[in-house]
Structure formats: structure tokens, C-alpha cells
Image: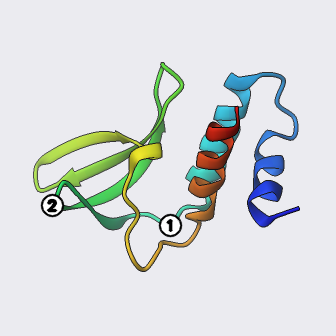
Amino acid sequence: MSRLDRLIEAAVVDCADESEAITGFYTMIEDNLRMPFTTEVLGMEVTVEGVALTDAQDIVALCRRGRFRQALPILNLPLPKPLPQGVEWIDAYRRWVRGR
């Protein structure tokens, strides 16, 4: 079993449905992803200050550039180099979403 598969299993171990699984991934990302970190979105540097779970069950990155704030789906968030600690949870979530 790969490391990402083990992370997926840990995130969804006690989940009864897809909604609970998404909440499981959100919790793991929030607890383990070191924030804030900077990344580039549309050629502009932004700071990822946190993550949130929307009412539509989307995990989003809470990004800021100066006085502007934007929530971006974590599935589409470009990741910086070097990668922040805990980014493997985003990778696991992305794999899980592709496989559902």
C-alpha cells in the first residue's frame, strides 16, 4: 500500500458517506498543513492563510494578496516549491477525488 493510500485510509476510516469523508480530509489538511505559505496564482504571489469547508462540501484555500482575499478550491491550488509541510494531505485528497 502506498503512502497516499495509507493517508486516504486514515482520513476516511470511520466515515459513513462521501460528506463525512470530505470532512475527514478537511480536518487532516487543516491539522497538518503548515500555514501560512506563499504560492503563485495567475502569475501573482498569494499567501495561503488557511483552509475552509464550504456549505457545498468544497475544501478551499483561503488566499490573500494585500487587501484582497479569495477562496480557491484546494483541488486547483498551485503548490509552491519547496512544498509546505503537510502537503501530502492535499495530494491524498486529490487522489481520493479522482478515484470516487
Image quadrant assignment for residue 19: top right
The residue indicated by pointer 2 is: 44
The residue indicated by pointer 1 is: 34
Q: CA distance from mark 1 to mark 2?
A: 21 Å
Image quadrant assignment for residue 5: bottom right
Image quadrant assignment for residue 31: bottom right
In the rendered image, residue 47, in percent from the top left (x then y), is placed at 28, 61
Residue type indicated by callout 1: Arg
In the image, 43: left or right of 86? Answer: left
Q: Residue lying furthest bottom in this view?
A: 82
Element under disc 2? strand
Q: What residue is drawn where x is 37% and y is 70%?
A: 80
Numbered badge on residue 55: none
Look at the numbered discs 1 and 2 and tell me whether their residues touch, using CB distance below 8 Å: no
In the rendered image, the quadrant that contains the N terminus is: bottom right
In the rendered image, the quadrant that contains the C terminus is: top right
Residue type indicated by callout 2: Met
In the rendered image, residue 28, in percent from the top left (x then y), is placed at 66, 51
In the rendered image, residue 96, in percent from the top left (x then y), is placed at 68, 42
Q: Using a 10 Å C-alpha cutoff, classify the residue at mark 1 as few (fewer than 14 neighbours), some (14 to 19) or many (20 or more).
A: some
Q: What residue is drawn where x is 46% and y is 27%?
A: 54
Q: Nearer the viewer, residue 61 or 99?
A: 99
Q: Nearer the viewer, residue 77 or 48?
A: 77
Q: Residue lying furthest left in this view?
A: 67
Label 1 vs label 2, nearer the camera: 2
Q: What residue is drawn where x is 31% and y is 39%?
A: 71
In the image, 92: left or right of 5? Answer: left
Element under disc 1? loop
| Rendered position, 9 above or below 48 | above
